[in-house]
């Protein structure tokens, strides 16, 4: 069939057809010697099954030995008598826990079952392993003068030296409150003195308005409640969460004088009861 195709290609010239056939045969032999998948499959399609797909008995002794942990159940039943011999690279391979030993525990994982497994909970960056919430300032007067209805957590836009001042505890929330300015909330009259007065920019106002960072839905809710009669947004606490400064805002309603007296009375009674029990 190949000879007929070559005769048609050479316009019936028999000598040219034999030469073309011989050239194609040599090319096929060369490609087969270099293990060409295309020629082997072509030979298989033409009927040369033995040349294209030589059938050789499997030599089980030359099979690649697999790691015991990577075998399937059938492999374990058949190869229990074969000792595992790791490769050259596997002999010097260290578990991943060695490379991650300097990281927090949440990142410490092991390579595979050979070295044991460690369950890692895929939590967000606000995981309990990373949250540290030391309080830098508490607004106790606000809790005494106001009734807290709701609380919201907000970020705050600060300058670099203001962050250092807050971390050193130089912040006062007495008399501070949040007000809306357009589509944003701003914290006013919160005092943050200069961390280093000599290196502070001129004209720095320690009670300047600072923008609060919340979601749009939370800002809309707080703006609506701030415009409600009798409600105020006051800062209750400044603390650090996930290495960032956070402000706890409270939607508050001012207490009446009677409520304050009742609170003082209950506090005194609880104090007297504690003293009595202590005796």
Image (spheres, rainbow, N blue to C red):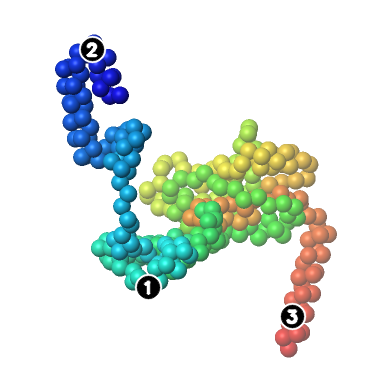
Q: Is residue 156 left or right of residue 9?
A: right
The residue wearing badge 2 is: 12
Chain-order first, disc 3 or disc 1: 1
Furthest-top residue in this view: 11
Residue 136 visible (yes or no): no
Q: Quadrant of the C terminus?
A: bottom right
Closest to the observer: 13 or 190? 13
Measured as percent of width and height from the top left, residue 121 is found at 53, 60
Q: CA distance from mark 1 to mark 2?
A: 66 Å
Q: Quadrant of the N terminus?
A: top left
Decide: marks 3, 1 in contact (CB < 8 A)? no
Per the image, label 3 sits on a secondary structure element best described as: helix
Q: Residues within 10 Å of mark 2 (few under 14, many from 20)?
A: few
Would you identify the image quadrant in which residue 276 lies? Answer: bottom right
Q: Is residue 20 left or right of residue 183?
A: left
Image position of 219 with respect to 167: above or below: above
Measured as percent of width and height from the top left, residue 172 is found at 57, 55
Residue 48's tag is none
Per the image, label 1 sits on a secondary structure element best described as: loop
Chain-order first, disc 1 or disc 2: 2
The residue wearing badge 1 is: 81
Image position of 97 with respect to 164: above or below: below
Residue 112 visible (yes or no): yes
> What residue is rendered at 73% in x and 54% in y?
148
Residue 274's tag is 3
Per the image, label 2 sits on a secondary structure element best described as: loop
> What residue is rendered at 44% in x and 60% in y?
107
Q: CA distance from mark 2 to mark 3?
A: 120 Å
Q: CA distance from mark 3 to mark 1?
A: 75 Å
Decide: marks 2, 3 in contact (CB < 8 A)? no
């Amino acid at each position: 069939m190949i000879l007929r195709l070559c005769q048609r290609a050479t316009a019936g010239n028999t000598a040219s057809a034999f030469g073309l056939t011989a050239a194609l045969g040599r090319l096929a032999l060369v490609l087969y010697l270099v293990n060409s998948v295309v020629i082997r499959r072509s030979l298989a399609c033409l009927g040369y099954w033995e040349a294209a797909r030589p059938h050789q008995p499997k030599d089980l002794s030359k099979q690649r030995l697999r790691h015991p942990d990577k075998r399937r159940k059938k492999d374990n039943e058949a190869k229990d008598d074969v000792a595992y011999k790791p490769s050259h690279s596997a002999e010097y391979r260290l578990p991943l826990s060695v490379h991650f030993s300097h990281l927090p525990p949440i990142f410490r994982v092991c390579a595979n079952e050979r070295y044991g497994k460690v369950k890692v909970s895929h939590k967000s960056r606000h995981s309990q392993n990373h949250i540290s919430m030391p309080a830098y300032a508490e607004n106790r007067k606000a809790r005494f003068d106001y009734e807290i209805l709701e609380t919201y957590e907000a970020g705050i836009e600060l300058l670099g030296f203001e962050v250092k001042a807050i971390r050193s505890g130089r912040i006062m929330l007495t008399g501070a409150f949040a007000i809306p300015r357009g589509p944003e909330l701003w914290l006013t009259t919160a005092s943050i003195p200069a961390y280093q007065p000599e290196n502070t920019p001129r004209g720095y106002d320690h009670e300047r308005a600072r923008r609060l960072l919340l979601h749009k839905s939370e800002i809309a809710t707080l703006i609506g409640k701030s415009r409600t009669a009798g409600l105020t947004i006051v800062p209750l606490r400044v603390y650090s969460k996930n290495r960032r400064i956070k402000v706890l805002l409270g939607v508050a309603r001012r207490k009446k004088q009677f409520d304050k007296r009742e609170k003082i009375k209950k506090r005194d009674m609880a104090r007297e009861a504690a003293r009595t029990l202590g005796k």
